[in-house]
């Protein structure tokens, strides 16, 4: 993998015709170190956010040994990481994948939110001597999404009397019983975790079970031009307070599953402007590519002109259009860029490391990326100034 000091150096050397996904492994490593040092438990990387070997390698180098996986292909991939402990946290799994996860890949940790799924797990992990005795089973409960920009509450999770009943039944089958939830991705304030842990507290009381593990899931935020979340330290202290109130033993084992917060700022995209029509820029990647969230959720990513000096400092709003022939391939932004942008210019679109490359498709023949590593700082960071205040866009 070729390595450059910055996007400008890459452009000078390569003049790329297509989009380039650039990794900043040092940014992933910094994020991972922060979580490993500050979270009082296992930090499991949510593999689906970005499976780049450069980023996963950096996370590993920074001490990440646990991985949250959701499918057999992810498991087969992550199982090659030495010493990795995998957690199969998708609440709906195929029987074959459960069987192979347990028997071929040594996975012991599974999530579930119904009795049917518990049955599937018990059936498929059974051995010649009967029911598995080493299962770590996490009951996924549904919790309200509060201040999440991508709520996940409708799809998975159990609650109330059903949840209490499932906890009791799972307790009987599990070597270790866990409770887990997901507050929704890009959660801007810690309230959702406080609230979720209060639900956990109520449910443990209702079910009257001994709980060995608590997994607070993912949802930790990153920073984007129009989204300045609370500092990450506040999330961890809110979680600590909530956990301290739980009726569990002192040494209950905690886990979190950050995806976005570990990798969002560790990838950046270089695109070229193929046409300018007023304040509309036609670029060579878009909503079917790395910029899915910009097209489909209206997200704004930091953007800057690279490869030449702007003729003035004045920034003006632009809308972006992707390269496919589909009119959905539109990113309304606004993306603030110098007024002088013209055809042939290169733009750096920052902080696309979470769910960018991971969900890019190849519709219309696009979706092929050159790759490179950059050594400079991410355009925006959550990890500046000892994480006390959300950082701003760095200057060029
Ligand atoms: C997607 C997912 C995560 C990661 O979520 P982020 O919002 O990226 O932190 C964690 N746990 C589970 C079960 C998930 O499905």
Image: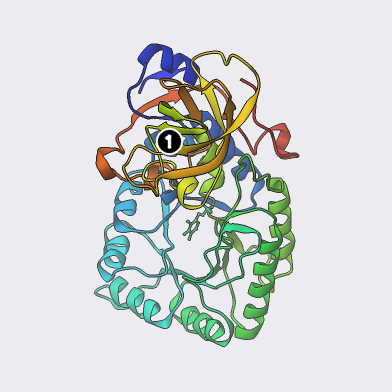
Left or right: 139, with 18 as reference point: right
How far across and how far down the image is residue 151, in percent? 55, 62
* Vertical placement of residue 331 versus 5, above or below: below
Q: Residue at x 71, y 47 (%)?
A: 233
Q: How many neighbours does mark 1 have within 10 angstroms: few (below 14), some (14-19), or many (20 or more)?
A: some
Q: Position of residue 108 (x, y in %)?
A: 40, 63
Nearest to the observer: residue 158 or residue 268 = 268
State whether residue 107 is above or below residue 26: below
Q: Quadrant of residue 202?
A: bottom right
> The N terminus is located in which quarter?
top left
- Tell me if I can see residue 74 in this picture: yes
Q: Which residue is found at the position 73% from the left and 32% from the top? A: 385
Measured as percent of width and height from the top left, residue 129 is found at 28, 76
The residue that disc 1 covers is 57
From where the camera sits, is residue 28 visible? no
Where the C terminus falls, by quadrant? Answer: top right
The local secondary structure at tag 1 comes to helix
User: Quadrant location of residue 95?
Assistant: bottom left
Q: How is the image coloured?
A: rainbow
Residue drawn at x 63%, y 16% as measured from the top left? 312
Q: Nearer the viewer, residue 284 or 232?
A: 284
């Amino acid at each position: 993998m070729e390595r450059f000091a910055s996007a400008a150096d890459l452009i000078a050397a390569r003049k790329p015709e297509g989009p380039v996904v650039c990794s900043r492994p040092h940014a992933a490593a910094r994020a991972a170190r922060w979580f490993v040092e500050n979270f009082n438990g296992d930090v499991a990387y949510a593999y689906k956010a970005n499976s780049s070997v450069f980023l996963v390698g950096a996370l590993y180098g920074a001490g990440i040994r646990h991985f949250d996986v959701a499918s057999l292909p992810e498991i087969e991939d992550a199982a090659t990481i030495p010493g990795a402990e995998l957690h199969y946290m998708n609440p709906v799994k195929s029987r074959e994948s459960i069987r192979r996860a347990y028997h071929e890949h040594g996975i012991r940790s599974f999530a579930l939110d119904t009795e049917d799924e518990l049955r599937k797990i018990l059936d498929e992990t059974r051995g010649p001597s009967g029911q598995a005795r080493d299962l770590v089973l996490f009951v996924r409960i549904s919790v309200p999404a509060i201040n999440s920009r991508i709520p996940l509450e409708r799809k998975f999770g159990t609650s109330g009397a059903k949840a209490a009943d499932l906890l009791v039944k799972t307790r009987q089958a599990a070597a270790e019983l866990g409770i887990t939830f997901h507050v929704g991705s890009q959660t801007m304030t810690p309230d959702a975790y406080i609230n979720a842990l209060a639900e956990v507290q109520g449910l443990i009381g209702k079910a009257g079970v001994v709980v060995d593990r608590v997994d607070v899931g993912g949802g930790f935020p990153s920073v984007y031009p129009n989204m300045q979340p609370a500092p990450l330290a506040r999330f961890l202290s809110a979680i600590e307070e909530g956990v301290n109130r739980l009726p569990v033993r002192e040494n209950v084992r905690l886990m979190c599953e950050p995806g976005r917060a570990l990798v969002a700022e560790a990838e950046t995209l270089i695109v070229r402007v193929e046409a300018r029509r007023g304040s509309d820029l036609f670029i060579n990647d878009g909503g079917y590519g790395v910029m899915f969230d910009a097209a489909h959720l209206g997200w704004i990513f930091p953007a800057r002109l690279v490869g030449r000096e702007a003729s003035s400092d004045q920034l003006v709003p632009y809308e972006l259009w992707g390269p496919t022939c589909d009119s959905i391939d539109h990113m309304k932004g606004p993306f603030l860029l110098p007024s002088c942008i013209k055809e042939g210019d290169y733009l750096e679109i920052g902080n696309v490391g979470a769910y960018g490359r991971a969900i890019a498709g190849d519709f219309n023949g696009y979706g092929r990326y050159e790759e490179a590593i950059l050594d400079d700082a991410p355009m925006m960071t959550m990890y500046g100034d000892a994480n006390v205040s959300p950082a701003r866009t760095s200057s060029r």
